[in-house]
């Protein structure tokens, strides 16, 4: 076959085309018959996916919302517990500072606790007492005492 290819002469410009290779089938031996499509399976998969995915999503959304609600409640409970811990710590620390005579430190602790729970009665009385002491001692927090006005 290589000899046949290499012994061919180059064709002249505008000449007729060469004859085909020796593997050309005769035109009268062709048979046409219907054959099943090879793409039929991919259409079936697409149809199944279009049915299955919405069903899965429809079934999972209620479970996801319950999960999110539970997670949000746990997060809120954790934050409340954390705030209670911080509030109690600030109150205890402020009382210790107040009893040891560190009035300005106690005032700062009570103001931080006041930011967490502004309506706590014991905290408000301790903050008022601390502000009264600061007004008598330093005479610069009196306007805050008037502003709070419990």
Image (tube, grey):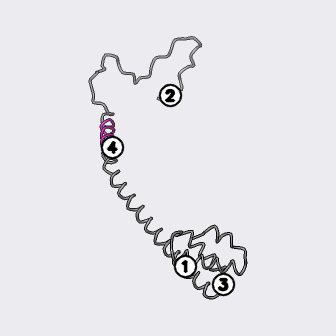
Left-right relation of 21 to 57: right
Q: Magenta residues, as a range?
A: 42-53
Quarter of the figure with the C terminus:
bottom right
Q: Which residue is mark 4?
A: 54
Q: Earlier in the sequence, mark 2 or mark 4?
A: 2
Q: Are marks 4 and 3 in contact (CB under 8 Å)?
A: no
Q: Which residue is mark 2?
A: 3
Circle 1 sits in a helix, a strand or a loop, which is it?
helix
Q: Which mark is residue 91?
A: 1
- Which tag is nearer the camera, tag 4 or tag 1? 1
Circle 3 sits in a helix, a strand or a loop, which is it?
loop
Q: Residues within 10 Å of mark 1 (few under 14, many from 20)?
A: many
Residue at 57% x, 78% y is 126
Q: Nearer the viewer, residue 33 or 89?
A: 89
Magenta segment includes 84: no
Q: Residues within 10 Å of mark 2 (few under 14, many from 20)?
A: few
């Amino acid at each position: 076959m290589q000899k046949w290819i290499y012994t061919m002469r180059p064709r002249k410009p505008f000449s007729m085309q060469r004859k085909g290779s020796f593997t050309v089938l005769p035109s009268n031996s062709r048979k046409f018959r219907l054959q099943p499509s090879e793409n039929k399976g991919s259409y079936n998969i697409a149809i199944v996916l279009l049915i299955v995915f919405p069903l899965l999503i429809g079934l999972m959304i209620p479970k996801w919302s319950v999960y999110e609600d539970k997670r949000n409640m746990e997060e809120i409970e954790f934050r409340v517990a954390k705030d209670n811990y911080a509030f109690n710590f600030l109150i205890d620390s402020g009382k210790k500072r107040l009893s040891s005579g560190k009035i300005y430190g106690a005032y700062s602790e009570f103001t931080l606790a006041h930011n967490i729970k502004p309506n706590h009665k014991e905290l408000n009385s301790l903050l008022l007492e601390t502000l009264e002491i600061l007004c008598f001692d330093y005479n610069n927090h009196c306007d805050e005492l008037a502003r709070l006005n419990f």
